[in-house]
Image: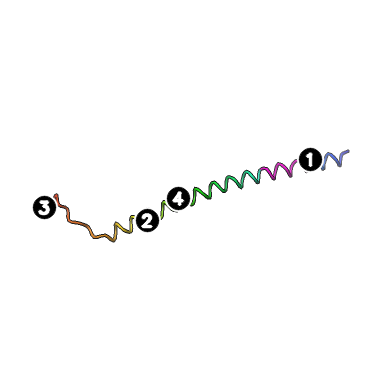
Amino acid sequence: MSTLKDVMSAMKEVLLLADKMDRAGAVLSEISGELRDHDRRLIRLETMVEIAEIRPRLPDKSRE
């Protein structure tokens, strides 16, 4: 009977590990999506900064 208990215990651990791996995979998928969103936002901000640096400044009419 001891061998059967060991087998059952090992099977239970394997099932728990598989469940944890599934949950970790789901969390990683969410993090991956958020990272892509942040990357897109950063690219937009970098583009805005580059455009602002390149565009010539217009004269300030309030000083005239």
Identify the mark nearer the N-term, 1 or 4: 1
* Amino acid marked by disc 2: Glu
Q: Residue 4 lies in what quarter of the image? A: top right
Image-based side of 31 in relation to 39, left or right:
right
CA separation in Å, label 1 and label 3:
85 Å
Element at label 1 = helix
Q: Which mark is residue 46?
A: 2
User: Callout 3, which amino acid?
Assistant: Glu
The front one of 33 and 8 is 33
Mark sitting earlier along the chain (1/3): 1
Determine which residue is flagged by label 4: 38
Residue at (86%, 42%) from the top-left corner? 3
Magenta span has 24? no
Q: Which residue is mark 3?
A: 64
* Residue type highlighted by circle 4: His
* Alpha carbon distance from label 1 to label 2: 54 Å
Between the C-alphas of marks 3 and 4, the distance is: 42 Å
Which of the two labelled residues, at mark 3 and mark 4, occupies the earlier sequence position? 4
Task: Say which residue appears at 13% left-offset and 51% top-offset.
Answer: 63
Q: Which residues are magenta?
A: 10-19
Where residue 21 sits in the image (x, y, percent)? 65, 46
